[in-house]
Amino acid sequence: MKRILPIALWFLLIVTACENPFAPGLSTHLTGSNLILTEQKTAEDVLTNFSYAYNFKDSLVYADLLDSSFLFISKNFATDPVTDLTWGRDVDIKTTVGMFHHFQTINLVWDGTLSSQYINTEHSLKEIRKTFKLTLDGGIEIPTISGEALFVFRKTLLNPPDTTGIWRILRWEDRSTF
């Protein structure tokens, strides 16, 4: 019994002193583009956080993307004739959280930017049209959805002397056709 304890301690010392050659090292200087989440200093940063929220099913990050006056607009292709679907921030968060719980894996990839422009002279509103691919549970039951979305972002100053502000989604129009 006396021999096992010193061997176990020696083994523990060796294991904790070794580095795993297959594991990436941790960076001690994460800045800018090295971060997974952004500070939403640009409208494009919001889209980075949007895909993070979907891919990691993070409802807290998702809720922080939406402006208090957020509006979601889409079409209901299950009706004849096709009808409009519209809802606000609270319903969107509830619906998205439900989707996060329902699917085991979600993979959102932004394909390309179709257009990007400021829509007011103060540069506090920006419109971006993006194409995307959304895969749910590896595309097993639902094929990968390729679509288009139009986002309108609003820049909000956090306090009076602040000039950088934070961007959030004011309106999201899902322009996908199924």
Image: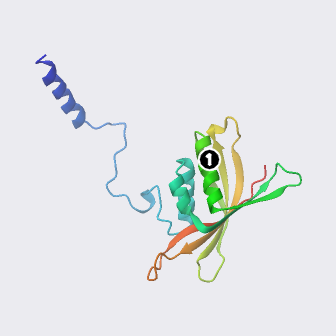
The crowd level at tag 1 (other Cα within 10 Å; few <14, some 14-19, many 20+) is few
> Residue 52: percent from the left, percent from the top?
53, 53
> Residue 35: percent from the left, percent from the top?
43, 57
| Residue sitting nearer the eye, 130 or 140 | 140
The image's colour scheme reads rainbow
> Residue 54: percent from the left, percent from the top?
57, 50
Give, as a three-letter code, the residue at label 1.
Gly
The residue carrying mark 1 is 98
- Determine the residue positioned at 70% across, 47% down: 145
Query: Does dot 1 land on a helix, a strand or a loop?
Result: helix
Does the rendering let one see residue 48? no
- Corner quadrant of residue 150: bottom right
Q: Quick one: which residue is furthest to the left in this view?
A: 2
Q: Quadrant of the N terminus?
A: top left
Q: Quick one: which residue is furthest to the right in this view?
A: 81
> Residue 177: percent from the left, percent from the top?
78, 53
- Determine the residue positioned at 59% across, 82% down: 122
Measured along the vertical axis of the image, is residue 107 above or below residue 127?
Answer: above
- Determine the residue positioned at 59% across, 68% down: 68
Measured along the vertical axis of the image, is residue 136 above or below residue 35?
Answer: above
- Corner quadrant of residue 32: bottom left
Q: How many marks?
A: 1
Does the rendering let one see residue 2? yes
